[in-house]
Amino acid sequence: MKKITPIILLFITIATFAQNEMFTNNGIIIFEASIPLYEENKAINESVYCVLNSKTGEFKSLVFIKDFHFKMPLMEEHFNENYLESNRYPKAIFKGQIQGFNINNIGTTPKEFKIKGKLEIHGKRKEITSLIVLRKINDTLELVSNFNIDLNDFNIQIPKILSMKIAETVNIKTSYVLK
């Protein structure tokens, strides 16, 4: 009986914490570094992992760099081998906090919050603050954001010959539906 009690308590604790976690493994991130008058420089990743603690507003997201896909295979190859060096830096991670988060105050009408945290890309970490829009859809929570990052902040070098075709400030759009 003495051995069974801690095991039962462990399962109850795990179940309690799991109830606070909402997650998805098929979030979407769109990366765009296009310059007007040149070919589109845009990639989509549809297998992004993310977790939200519905009690605290703590948010974590993980994306594997090689899962970004471009219209042109050559762009994807350069993206992975020359710029993001995905063999050396295989993932990007964001860990943050949704400011003023309260799951009970979120309804079907989109509501805007600030999210603050650290973004790690290409082995470099930077504090970022962005807006995030939340809304409930049935038993899920939709999170959408749109923000910019500067490639220089993450030590991502664009060769001079391509600097006129690739933006140094990249737009990142995210969309998650958490269960």
Image (cartoon, grey):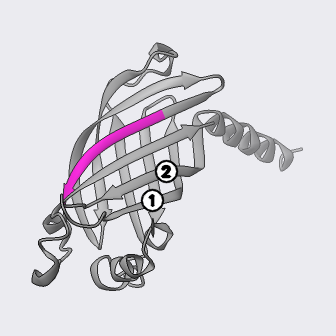
Q: Where is 90 relative to 25, above or below?
A: below
Quadrant position of the C terminus in the picture: top right
Q: Which residue is drawn at the image coordinates 18% and 70% (left, top)? A: 165
Mark 2: amino acid: Ile
Report which residue position mark 1 lands on.
44
Q: Which of marks 2 and 1 is in front?
A: 1
Q: Of the numbered discs in the image, which one, if any, rests on residue 18?
A: none
Q: Where is 115 relative to 169, above or below?
A: above
Q: Position of residue 30 (x, y in %)?
A: 40, 54
Report which residue position mark 2 lands on.
28
Residue 122 placement, left or right of 174: left
Quadrant of residue 150 within the rendered picture: bottom left
Quadrant of residue 31 within the rendered picture: bottom left
Q: Residue furthest right?
A: 1
Q: Which residue is drawn at the image coordinates 38% and 29% (left, top)? A: 133
Q: Where is 147 relative to 106, above or below?
A: below
Question: Badge 1 local density, few (<14 within 10 Å), some, or many (20+)?
Answer: some
Residue 119 placement, left or right of 3: left
Residue 143 placement, left or right of 36: right
Q: Distance between the residues labelled 2 and 1?
A: 7 Å
Quadrant of residue 119 within the rendered picture: bottom left
Mark 1: amino acid: Ile
Proximity of marks 2 and 1: CB atoms separated by less than 8 Å:
yes
Q: Is residue 149 magenta?
A: yes
Q: Which residue is drawn at the image coordinates 44% and 49% (left, top)? A: 60
Magenta part of the chain: 143-150
Q: Position of residue 141 (x, y in %)?
A: 55, 30
Q: What element carries label 1?
A: strand
Q: Is residue 178 magenta?
A: no
Q: What element carries label 2?
A: strand
- Mostly what secondary structure, the magenta segment? strand
